[in-house]
Amino acid sequence: MIFIEAQSKKPDRRQASLKIPVFIQPGIAEKVISIELGFGRDKAGEVGSNVGFNANVLLLKDYRLSPFIFSASVTKVSGKYDLVSTQEHHSLDDTFVKDLHLKRKIIREGTVHQYQNEPDFLEKDKHEPFSITKEVEYKGVKWGMVIDLNKCIGCSGCVSACISENNIPIVGKEQVEKGREMHWIRIDRYFSGTSEEPQVSNQPMLCQHCDHAPCENVCPVAATNHSPDGLNQMAYNRCVGTRYCSNNCPYKVRRFNFLDYRDDFADGFYEQQPISLLYNPEVTVRSRGVMEKCTFCIQRIMEAREVAIEEERELKGNDVTTACQQACPAEAIVFGDVNDPNSEILKYRKHELGYHVLEEINVKPNVTYIAKLRNTHSEKIS
């Protein structure tokens, strides 16, 4: 814990102080402390009140440059406060974490100069796994997604949209600390380089809807299965909660309801009226003991299919927009029919920078990532 005291430039004006915990992050300049505003409110309802610390008390009006940038005295004080993060839940140790995303090729990156001179530089590391099973032929529409890492700004807008669209429960800080977050899509953050000059990479991660999904063949009750249009489906009322599928998922994107979080969180706040009316009526409200994960917004796909039937036409890939795609301010997410030769998503999937995460294990994901290109200082034209 540290004690921050901000002093006004004018001697007759007030001082401001705040006692707040510290979360050390690489990349912050020496003698600089960054504090997010918007927390510590006391009149924000059951969910938003008394969460975090109110840094607005440090904003004095008479600073020369900006009330958001000022000098302050900082003192280390006693006290303990639990800081909870969803990052690195599945890491083993520091050695394992160090540049893991580059070693395993989870994040693929290059430079603008490298791409200009060798557009297919990703191809030399491509894997072509051999399979003894016959490939399934998908006739008609087959759903897929592309995420452009050059456009993604890591804002978590897709996460918020997914929560609202799919009735994902709020589990609270205590459960997140135990590794029981429920978000169907997460923004993975990776550091590389040194702590003095770190390089940060962000990657939205969700169910990859694998064609050779390792979760499907271990479910004893066939609660998770594959649809004719390429979706990895979940039948909630069939799931018996063995969690075999979660253990077998290499991407760790499946979530298990250990509790009835709507009743367990904030004294049943989300079961009270009229709060319960916020749920999307098109999506099942799950209870404890079942596995859940991204569905590619199946409810929107079904609605689009019904409209196509009413209009007596074929369902098209651009008839459906997922919640995450719709909310993305950078338009980094593309969704559609990968069997449509004229679709935008097929152009992305065939791009030289397109790749699949952990493609060497041959699970055949249906989420393609576009490798990030960095325009480094040494390549800038004078």
Image (cartoon, rainbow, N blue to C red):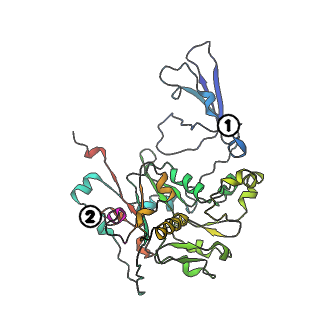
Which element is circle 1 on? loop
Specify the quadrant that holds the C terminus.
Answer: top left
Q: From the viewer's perspective, is 353 left or right of 36?
A: left
In terms of image quadrants, where is residue 332?
Answer: bottom left
Q: Which residue bears the numbered disc 2? A: 120
Q: Of tags 1 and 2, which is closer to the observer?
A: 1
* Residue 297 pos. (x, y %): 53, 63
* Residue 65 pos. (x, y %): 47, 22
Above or below, 266 against 300 in this view is: above
Q: Nearer the viewer, residue 44 or 60?
A: 44
Q: Which residue bears the numbered disc 1? A: 41
Residue 172 shown in magenta? no
Q: Nearer the viewer, residue 377 or 123?
A: 123
Which element is circle 2 on? loop
Q: Is residue 233 visible?
A: yes
Query: In the image, which residues are magenta?
Result: 339-347
Name, please, the residue furthest toward the right: 267
Q: Is residue 357 visible?
A: no
Q: Nearer the viewer, residue 312 or 219?
A: 312
Local packing at callout 1 (Cα closer than 10 Å; few below 14, some 14-19, many 20+) is some
Residue 344 shown in magenta? yes
| Type of amino acid under label 1 | Arg
